[in-house]
Every structure is written in structure tokens, then in C-alpha cells.
Amino acid sequence: MAFQAYGGEGWLLTKLEQLINWGRKRSPWPLPYGTACCGIEMMAALASGYDLARFGAERPSFSPRQADVLIQAGTITKKMVPIFKRIYDQMAEPKWVISMGACACSGGVFRTYSTLQGIDLVVPVDVYVPGCPPRPEGLIYALIKIMEKIEKDHPLRKKAAEIGIGG
Amino acid sequence: MEVRRPTIEDWDNPGDLVTINIGPSHPAMHGTLRVIAQTDGETIVSAEPEIGYLHRGVEKLGEHLTYHQFIPITDRLNYCSAIANNVSYEMAVEKLMGIKVPEKAQVIRMIMMELARIADHIVCIGILGVDLGAFTPFFYLFIQREEIYEIFEWYNGARLTNTFGRIGGVEADLPEDFEERWRKLLPNLKKAIDETDKLLTHNRIWMDRTIGVTAFSPEDALSWGFTGPCLRACGVKRDLRKDEPYCFYDQVDFEIPVGKHGDVFDRYIVRMIEMEESIKIIDQAIKIYKEFPPDAPLMAKVPKIIKPPVGEVYSAIEAPNGELGFWIKSDGSDKPYRIKIRPPCYMVYQAFPELVQGEMIADLIACLSSLNIIAGELDR
Amino acid sequence: MNWVIAIIKVVFIWTWCLLWATVMTWAERRGSAMIQDRLGPNRAGPFGLFQPIADGIKLFTKEEFRPKTARKILFNLGPILFAIPAFSAYAVIPFGDKIVIGGKEILLQVADVNIGFLYVLAIGALAVYGIVVGGWGSNNKYSILGGLRSTAQLISYEVPWGLALLAAVFVYGTFDLRQIALEQTGTFLGFLPNWGVFKQPLGFLIFTVAAYAEANRVPFDLPEAESEIVAGYHTEYGGMRLGLYLFGEYVNLYTLSALCVTLYFGAWNLPYIDMSKFLGPISYGIASFVVFWLKVMVFLLSFIWVRWTVPRFRYDQVMRLGWKTLIPLALFNLLITALFIQLTV
Amino acid sequence: MGLKEDVQNTLGELALDFLECQGDLSVTVPKDKIVEVLTKLRDNLGFNFLSDVFGVDNSVFYEKLAKAKAKKKKGEEDKEEEPQGPPPPRFEVVYLLLSLETNKRLAVKIQVPEDDLVVDSVTCLWKAADWPERETFDMFGIRFKGHHNLKRLLMWDEFPAHPLRKDYPLEGQGEERILEYND
């Protein structure tokens, strides 16, 4: 079977996977979802001093369909939860989530009736950035962590397993 | 300027209107604002803002924290200029307890607040530019904002949420080379403001997009409870720094810029001039600061556990966005009984339907950015 | 033999357009970074040059998603309708003079059509269908708004565009783009290069403004005004469909710049110097190609420069500028040109 | 010739009680006369700017006061017995006024008992009262008669409680917002 190559460690497929991973790694278009204080620091990270664009995260895509990395910067309140969930659902695969700041990670100082105690209750999170708010370097570090995660991915094999061919 | 705004009756067939839901996940809505607009093509027939997407229960939280513990929470109100919030809250508690803050601490507060004002206006103008399609000024201004952050960071260790000051004074003196740093920052800051001015103010497209857009009369503005730059843009000369002076604002010389029509352009210009005035204030405040001996006291005598007497006070300062007030009711215990925050942009934003009615979708965005709505203090 | 050459030319110019559209996306990012005191993408390859490739790979492997409420056919058709005219418009625009290989004269132009002018206009007008169909098919209010804005804008600016071009036709007396390029040699009034821009300064101005509007670039990027209608007509698009839209835009830019150079900036002619006199047939062909390309690049960079300098117009202002300023101006230009020709010839 | 006398003269019998704290003056007025009082203050004393409107839940405050009083009473028995009236109304609505000419501030308070949570809206005097009144309704459940659009402001519409009341726990009662995808 020709498709069995997907399961093996074929040189060509490995290289192809590497190429795909390289492309995804170098072009993580962010969906900057800054709701609170962290949003300002995220802006600082996008601005000249830190310049997230160096990593290819140049084009902030406000349409969730076009984004790869959801940067949740700031508190998600309970009123916002359905909307936030919907944005995540609207993003096309493959997608990653950075939870930036204490509020997004765990609710932070706001242990109150209206605050969601961490966005991981609603969506899967890839990288947490602690801090209230984290420095822009923190966000850049998180983005690099996402890149490392992408590098270890096996997009073709996953796809093959999904549609039930190969091993 | 006479503005007649069309109302919903002016449309022959309201059934043809399209409802557009703008936000909360919308690039110009800062993540948390939402406007439900009825539009006829591009023209807005009616707009209804919905808020509360960043309601974090700050006031309720305040009732469960001690007076000191609440200072960091105030950082997260208007996160663009946390220091102004801190000082406003501290001043309210000091008023409640009848504490007189040492004069040197007041000068330090003043210097820091004006720096915060510049930082806040930079965010507002930068984002107004971005929302109108002019990206570059945002970057020019943000470089200088980083420099201001450097000063904050090196004074008290935090960039954005500074938790500046203590109840009864400030925690530390200004570092020795503060003035040196300020002198180093100043020409660059002026240059950035100047470049923004060159890029935008006399740009024909910018003028077309902002002049006359969402103009507002002073009577309306006062009735809606406008304060700060938005009110001054309407032509009302009101600034708490002059009208109810606190710190050393009555001893420094500065102008209050006033607009004419209350449109987006006036709000922008008022903010631009205010940045320059703030620079003037800081220069003078540094002069006052240097008159104090290095060992002058920075803290008033304040008990370790703060237990104000039973009572209620309201204290307000001129935050970058306008009158930021704290109403505190004490029941004599170490926790405030009730804290009410009077955020400036809350009052401004409620006039939004009236502001944008009859304008176009693009104007709605321009108006929103020029009002400088900060969700943190809007929803609390 | 001719059809082999034709195919080679098609493939060559297609790859060339593609290549420079790709480089343009890189140049735009780096250029904007330069203007804004930033570094720009610099991780993917040397100077971040492979950034567009990374974007392409990512867009290709991204999930192809279609909203449930979208019209399937229209949704799929939109990007294709947008990209094809962008590529095909270049067919009649020359990209150099001619090259002589083995005694055979090869024109550096895919098709030397004597109504090339009209062809460009017609194909250019087709691009709007891609936007409208995509916007309508997405079944999203923002997309429809973007599509509507685009339609109104393109229709409004086709008129002054066409009128400005008409004035140029008056001057050159031909619809043939190659002929127009050949006419722009020598000097004009004794000291200026004999370029269209000196004969038609107003026409050039109108053409440039209209070209910005045709290409949906700032200050006319209303169809995709990011802060107003999220991403405009391509709000619902992701993956390679989006890639086609983004790419098509840059190919469009390349075509427009090439047209502008052909009409107003002497195509491959250098001012005061006649290259064909001291260069061999092959090297002349290559030189003319390079000169043409460099001129196009200058225009492309000016697109970037303007993009990051000025704010965006409002919808009604765009309309006002188009109908109340540009069209009267273009008519006036036409009148002046006609009078001038009538008096001098 | 202070502000207190001015207010006393203007309001006459309507001023039920004055409270001065660190130079801040607040006056308590009858609940059903609030529009009349504010109109008088605006027109006669120049309090032409409404800073804020908000509610206060005083239930715990009165409890604490009573406890403190009881403690004191234990210490000094000889103090004369105070008449036991009906318990004071639970809620308070505070109107912060400002005079733009004299820069004087005044707080006007009304007492709202728990069984009659309806107050006249002052949106007819100042448009600024629009959202603050909605917020007070949202947070305390106090209704404003005559408000054109009285619905929840900060919490979502289906939210069952009034969070700033003292008997509502800080961390909530587990309310979640559920929004179905309807497409």
C-alpha cells in the first residue's frame, strides 16, 4: 500500500513534515485578543521595542479564520465566556493558544463572582505566561515555546491517522 | 457647530435596516466593548453599546480587602495610567483619615502622574491613528512610551501596574539620576510628538476624517457628565488640576487646552497639547522637588493597620481621561465598607448612541478611539 | 516554433510576477518595519526573505474551512475570480523591448495586441467580481459591506482611470501598448525625456490615485478596512483561499505599476541614452528588461511608502473624491489634451 | 455662611439629616422627593453637574453599629435608653453633585427600604444618570421609575442575583452564562 509510507519513517515524508512545520513555525499569525491590562503589554510587544514581527507574527488577524495563534491577553469574564469559546471554535486547524497573564491563566487577583478562573476551563491552552501583566519578553518567550511545540508536531501522520490510513 | 442628527423616524422603511454587531471581538473594540448598530448602508441609524464584558467585580472585591490591599487592584482600572488611579485612591483614603501627606511626596506623585498622563495619551492617540488607518505614529509614540516605562520600572519595579505610592505618602524617593533620565527622554519624546503632529494634524485625509465628526455641544456634554479631554474638546474649560487643585498644581504654570466643536479632531488636539503641557509641568515640578532636602520625609505618620473612622468621603483627581473619583464609606473596620469608583470614561461612553447617530460606520470607530474608552475602568 | 516561444514567455512572466509578488509581501513587511523603526521578519531565511514562503506553506496546510451558511460555489469561486484577472492582465503589457536570439526577434511581451489598452481596462474591471462574489458568498455582514464598498469604489474609479488613459491615447494616437512604449524615446521640448508623464502630468496624477483605489491600497483600502469591518470581504476566508486574495493583490500591484511605467515613464527607455546603439542584441534585450523592472520596483515601493504614511478615507469621501474631483479633473485634462493636439498637429 | 446653611435654606424641611465628614457634606432627603430636591439644588444653588449615582447596601453597617452600641452599653449602663424605632431602611442611593461655578460638592442621599425598591429616575434632569441608574439596578436591584431603558448593565440579562448586595458572596453562587449557538 502506498499510503503505508505515512506510518513509517520515510525520508521524504519526514522532510515534508519538517517543511510544513517550518512553514507553520515561521508564520504564526496571531489573533491578538487583548481584553485588559495585558492587552497593552501585548501592544508593546507588537510595537517597535520588542517587535513580535521578527518571528513572522506580523499580520495580526482579527478574523479568527485567518489566525493560527490565539493570544488571550487579559481577563475573561463569565459574560465573555461564550464569545471567547466561539472565537476559539471559529479558528481553523491547526491552532494554538497562549494564555497571557495571571487573569487568563487562573483568574489572577480577581477571585470574584464575575471572573472566569482561568481560560483553560473553556479552551485548551498551549502556553501559559505568568505575570500581572507579563513583560513583552514573556510573550515573546511564549511564542518561541509555541514554535518549539510546532517543531515536534507530525502533521502528516496525524492526518493519516485521522482518516484511518497507515499506522 | 450646528449638527442635526437624523433620527430613526427619518428613515422611510425601518425594516430595511441592517443590524450590525460590532464587537466584542473586533479590532477596534479593544476586546471588550460591543456596539449593536442599526445601519442603513453605511450610515448608523442607532447604536447601542453593551458593556460589562470586563466586569471583574472590583467594587465588591474592595469590600473584602484591607485598605492597603486595594491599591494594586486600582492599577487594573485604567491600566494605561495606573499611577493616576493609585494616587486617586490613596488621596481618598488619606482624606477619610485626615492625613496630611508630606510635600515632597506630593511633588513625586505629581511628577509620576504627569508621566502617566503622557503615557495614557500616547496610547489613545496611537490607537486612534491605527483605527483610522495610520499605523506609523503608533509605533513612533510607543517607542517613547517604552522609555517612560523604563522610568516607572526603575522607580518601582513594574512597567504597567505600578502600585505606586502608599497611603500617607510614597514609598521611596526619586532615584538620584531621575532628572538626568528625564532630560535624556525629553528631546526624543518631543520629537515623537512632533513627528506625529507632522504625520497627522495637517494631513488632509486626517482632517477630513476627524473634523466635524461626532461633534458635541458643551451643554450636552455637561448633561451627559463628560469630564477630561472629551469635555474640554467641547469648549468647557474644566480641569480639576486648576479648579480643585491638589498636590502642587496651583504652584505650577500650565495651560488648559480647549477645543471648539467637541469632534474627534478636537479631542485629538486637546490630548496632543496636554502632552506638551504635562512636559512643562514635569519640568517645573522637578524644580520644586529640588528645593527639598534629600532627607525630607516621604511618609506621614500612618498606623500599620489602617482603620479610618466611620464616615464617607468623595475625592477626585484629574486622571488622563477625566474626573476619577473614589467614594469610600468606612464602618470603622480595617476594610472599606463600600468603595464606589467614578470612572471618567463610563460617563463619556454612555453618550455614545447620541454621539454617533447619523454618522458612518468608519466614524463610529474613530469616535470610539478618540473617547479613549478603557474597559478596565469602564466595567470595573 | 512561435507557440513554444509564446509558452516560454507566458511561463516566464507568470513566474516572474509570482516571484515579485512574493518578494513584495516581504518588502512590504520589511519596508513597513523600516518606516516604523522596527526590524520586521528576520527569522525565516536571510533577512527573513523566506517569510512569504513560510506563509505560503502555512496557508496551504491550513484547514480549508467553509462556513455552514456560506454559498459553496460562490465562496470557492471568489478567490479564483480575483486571482485570474490579476495574472491575465499582464498578458499585453510589455516587459522589455525585444531580444534577438539566433536571428529570431522575440518581443518581450506575451501578446502584442493592438487594443492592449482596452484589454487591460476590461480585465482590470473583472477583478471586482472576485471581491463581490467572495463577500456575498461568505454570508457575513462585514464581508458584504466590504464587497459593496469595493464595487462602489471600483466603478467610481474606473471612470477617471479610463478618462486619464483616454487622454494618454490622444497623445500617443494608438491603443497598442508596445507602440506607446516605443514612442517615448528621445527628448521632449528639447530637454525633458520624452515620457508620458511630462506630456500628461495631470493624467498621471489621476491615474496614480485611481490605481491606488483599483488596488485597494491605503488610503483606499476600504473593502478590507481592518479596524472597521474586521477583514472586509475576506473575513470568512482562511487557508489558501485567503492566500489567493492576498497574492492576487500584489500581482495586481505589479500589473498596475507596469502599466504606469509603460504609459508615463518611458517603459524600458532610459532618459537621454539610447541603449540599443551601444549594446548587442541580446544584452540590449536583457538591459531593457532590467530597466523596465527597476522602474516597476520604484513604483511598487512607492505603494508601500504611501501605505504606511497616510490614514484611510471614509466611504463617502472616497466617493466624493472620485466623482466630484477626479472625474472633472480627468475631463478637463482630456479637453486640454484634445485642444493642444488640435492646435499643434 | 457655609454650604450646609445654604442647603438647609434651600431645601427647608426636605433636608432630613446632614452628615459632615472631612469637609464633605451629605444630606439625606425623603425618597419620593428626590427629583424635586435635585431640581431645587440645581436651579437655586448651582449644582449643575451630576458626578455619579450609586447604591449602598447598609444592612451590615447597621448591624455593626448596633453591635458597637451594645458593647458600649454594656460598659456604661447609665446612658439613657434610646427609643427602639423600626430598623433603618436597608439601601441608600447616593447622588454626587458638583457645582461648576463654585467647585463645591454635595452628596444627596435617599433611604430605600427593602420592601419598596422603587425610586424616581433623575434622567429627566441629567442624562448622565442613565447608566449609573442601570448599574444600581443591576447591582442592588433598586428600580428607577421613569428610566427609559432599565435593564442590566454589567451582568448579563439572565443573571439571577444582585452582586453588590452584602448577602451575595464575593465568589458568586456558581452562575455561568450559557449562550447557545443559534445557526
Image: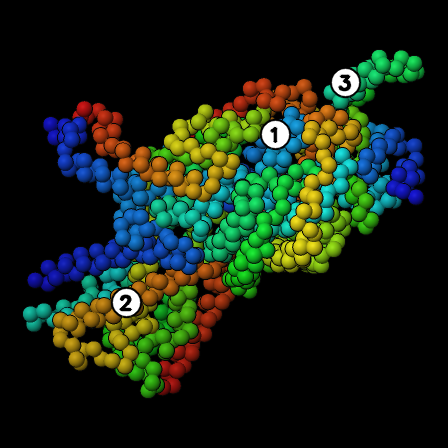
Q: Residue type at mark 3: give it.
A: Glu
Q: Nearer the viewer, mark 2 or mark 1?
A: 1
Check disc 3 and report its element: helix, strand or loop.
Answer: helix
Q: Nearer the viewer, mark 3 or mark 1?
A: 3
What residue type is disc 2 on? Leu
The answer to whether any part of residue C284 appears in the image is yes
- What kind of element bears circle 1? loop
Q: Position of residue D6 (x, y in %)?
A: 90, 41
- Residue in the image at 63% along x and 31% along y: B69
How is this picture coloured? rainbow
Query: What is the chain letter for disc 3?
Result: D
Q: Amino acid at mark 1?
A: Gly
Dot label at residue B23: none
Q: Are marks 2 and 3 in contact (CB under 8 Å)?
A: no
Tell me the quarter of the image containing the N terminus of chain B.
bottom right
| Same chain shared by disc 3 and disc 1 | no
Task: From the image, tell me which residue sits under label 3.
Answer: D63
Q: Residue at x 63, y 40 (%)?
A: B171
In percent of width and height, residue C329 lies at 46, 71
Is B87 on the left or on the right of B28, as rendered? right
Disc 2/disc 1 C-alpha distance (Å): 61 Å
Q: Is residue B218 left or right of residue C198?
A: right
Residue at image point 10% right, 63% down: C2
Q: Nearer the viewer, residue C168 or C31?
A: C31
| Mark 2 neighbour class, 10 Å CA radius: few under 14, some 14 to 19, many 20 or more | some
Query: Disc 2 marks which residue?
Result: C294
On screen, residue D24 above or below D58 = below
Report which residue position mark 1 lands on: B57
Image-based side of C333 in relation to D134, left or right: left
Mark 2–mark 3 distance (CA, rounded to whole Å): 84 Å
